[in-house]
Image (tube, rainbow, N blue to C red):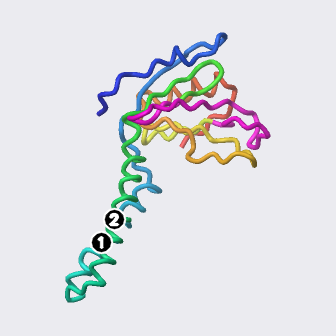
Amino acid sequence: MSDLPPFDFASKLKADEELLWTGRGSGRNMAGKLVFPMVALAGLGAFLLLGFPLSGFQTDMAWVALFGLAISAVAIWFFRARILAPSSEDYAITNQRVLIVSGPIGRICRSYLPSQNKRTDRRAMMFYAVKLIAKRDTIIFVPARAKSMPQGFDPVFVGVENAAEVAELAAQTFKVKLLKR
């Protein structure tokens, strides 16, 4: 999987914070919303690659094919990174927040606070429920949306061992709803 050393969460803890659980992703994030665009881009790249010989090797079509292949390759690279990223992600649950460390280069530690409401006025990234997808050993922290701050991807623990126990621990610790799927 990943040969990165485990992240030192103790250095990120606040004075009154206690580390309850740490883990690492398995490297599998085969969500349908990620696989379909990747397959579509690969199909577009194949179409453009075949379009050049089928056009009678016209120079204009060669430039279109090269440009299209370059765009497809860059897009597939980013989707690949999102699918394989969990193998380099470290996760932690403290008594106050959830921490996700991602990125093989320049590891970034993101922090998510619990909220009791679906909407929040705070500028911090917050979640209001814990969703367990047992089939994929995935735990999604359902974000509390703020009008002033876009959330991006939902905070998620992908492919963790004992996902049901970890989800229950998070729900009990933060006193939020546990949704099972």
Secondary structure type for disc 1: helix
Please say whether residue 102 is one of the residues in the magenta stretch. yes
Name which residue lies at 45% across and 38% down: 158
Is 52 in front, or is 153? 52
Is 54 in front, or is 171? 54
Residue 111 position, x and y percent, is 60, 30
Using the rendered view, name the quadrant where residue 120 is placed.
top right
Secondary structure type for disc 2: helix
Is 130 in front, or is 91? 91
Residue at numbered disc 1: 66
Name which residue lies at 51% across and 26% down: 166
Name the side, left or right, on which 52 lies relative to 151.
left
The residue range painted magenta reads 100-129
Q: What is the count of numbered marks?
A: 2
Residue at numbered disc 2: 70
Amino acid, disc 2 = Ala
